[in-house]
Image (cartoon, rainbow, N blue to C red):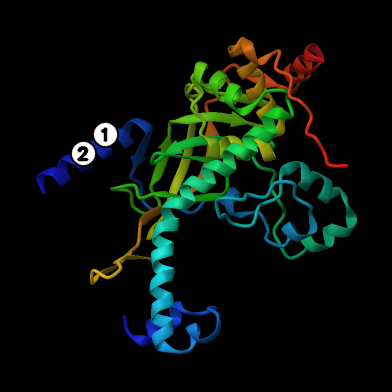
């Protein structure tokens, strides 16, 4: 038990440097993260499809929503859903954040599953400090290794378990077989916003074009 | 495990292995052994795939994978290969910025000439 408690404290201290947990009373959920209507995704052609990590169907980027709102044919699909509020962050904003020893590409308004955070309950606010890269449609802030003062704010949605994996160990001709079921604990968090990166040196599209002209 | 669990795990197997318990039991045990081994292999395979993708992305900009990673290590950029491969696919301008940083960090990157792939005629 003592060793388990010691390992727990080291994990908590290592987590404490990278993210902080604040316990709040349950509040009403954020409107801007849930206001993206479900039916829009089929009418627009999206260029970005996440390949490795499962996520909700993508809410449309604000540039696509601007085009669709001007198109009168797709306006009829908006009848049943509430009027779309433009997101309060820059278009195409994303960040690469390191949590639980793994790196994730994170977009505001979507959820990800990460390793279980001990001591976090549902509807807790989380601040993730280890932000390695922040990007928008026009510029990119590359951290060496971390973008200073950048924070990703998130809310814990659920502390659950992964799907069950059967661990089966077997040695032939030696009458040895073991069957163990395993469910890895995880935490699902909803990303609220990415902040604090504005004062960091950035690379914009003009810089990249200058580099291209210099090389060629 | 009892028979129902075996048959549940034997769904989609070929021939009698999904219907007859004696054969299904052997095949399911083999399948579970393979899944144990492949959970470890998957990590290796994914890393190899990410490296191939990063290689393809950087060669479009005139740098190969080895020199690119060397430049990133020099600049103390700690993005891992999974994220780099996703950036190379979906965020081309951010990836170009990273390639430029690597070129400036490691001067040997600038004069690298990637020979064009030979296509069979």
**Relative to residue A122, is residue B89 drawn left or right?**
right
- Residue marked by disc 1: A13
Residue placed at 56% from the left, 25% from the top? B69
Identify the image quadrant of the C terminus of chain B: top right
As helix, strand or loop, the secondary structure at mark 1 comes to helix
List the single residue furthest toward the front. A173
- Where is residue A32? Give x, y as percent: 60, 48
- Where is residue A56? Give x, y as percent: 59, 57
Residue A107 visible within the image: no
Residue placed at 54% from the left, 20% from the top? B70
Q: Is residue A172 above or below residue A196?
A: below
Callout 1–callout 2 Cβ contact below 8 Å: yes
**Relative to residue A121, is residue A95 drawn left or right?**
right
Chain under disc 2:
A
Few, some or many C-alpha atoms within 10 Å of disc 2 (few <14, some 14-19, many ≥20)? few
Which labelled disc corresponds to residue B54? Answer: none
Q: Which quadrant would residue A128 be assigned to in this image? A: top left
Identify the image quadrant of the N terminus of chain B: bottom left
Chain under disc 1:
A
- Residue marked by disc 2: A9
Residue A161 visible within the image: yes
């Amino acid at each position: 038990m003592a060793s388990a408690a010691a390992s727990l404290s080291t994990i908590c201290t290592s987590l404490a440097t990278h993210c902080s947990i604040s316990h709040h009373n349950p509040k009403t959920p954020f409107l801007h993260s849930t206001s993206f209507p479900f039916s829009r995704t089929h009418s627009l052609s999206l260029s970005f499809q996440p390949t490795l990590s499962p996520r909700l169907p993508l809410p449309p980027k604000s540039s696509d929503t601007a085009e669709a709102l001007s198109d009168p044919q797709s306006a009829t699909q908006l009848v049943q859903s509430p009027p779309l509020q433009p997101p309060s962050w820059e278009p195409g904003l994303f960040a690469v954040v390191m949590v639980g020893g793994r790196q994730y590409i994170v977009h505001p308004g979507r959820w990800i599953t990460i390793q279980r955070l001990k001591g976090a309950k549902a509807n807790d606010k989380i601040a993730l400090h280890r932000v390695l890269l922040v990007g928008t449609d026009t510029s990119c802030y590359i951290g060496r290794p971390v973008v200073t003062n950048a924070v990703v704010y998130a809310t814990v949605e659920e502390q659950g378990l992964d799907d069950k994996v059967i661990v089966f160990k077997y040695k032939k001709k030696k009458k040895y077989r073991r069957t163990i079921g395993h469910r890895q604990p995880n935490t699902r968090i909803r990303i609220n916003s990415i902040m604090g990166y504005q004062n960091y040196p950035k690379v914009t599209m003009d810089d990249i074009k200058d580099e291209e002209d210099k090389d060629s | 495990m009892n028979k129902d669990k075996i048959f549940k795990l034997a769904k989609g197997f070929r021939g009698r292995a999904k219907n007859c318990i004696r054969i299904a039991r052997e095949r399911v045990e083999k399948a579970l052994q393979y899944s144990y081994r492949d959970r470890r292999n998957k990590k290796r395979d994914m890393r190899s795939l990410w490296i191939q993708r990063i290689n393809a992305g950087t060669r479009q900009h005139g740098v190969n994978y080895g020199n690119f990673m060397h430049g990133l290590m020099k600049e103390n950029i700690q993005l891992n290969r999974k994220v780099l491969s996703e950036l190379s696919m979906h965020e081309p301008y951010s990836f170009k910025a990273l390639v430029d940083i690597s070129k400036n960090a490691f001067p040997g990157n600038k004069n690298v000439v990637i020979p064009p792939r030979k296509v069979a005629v």
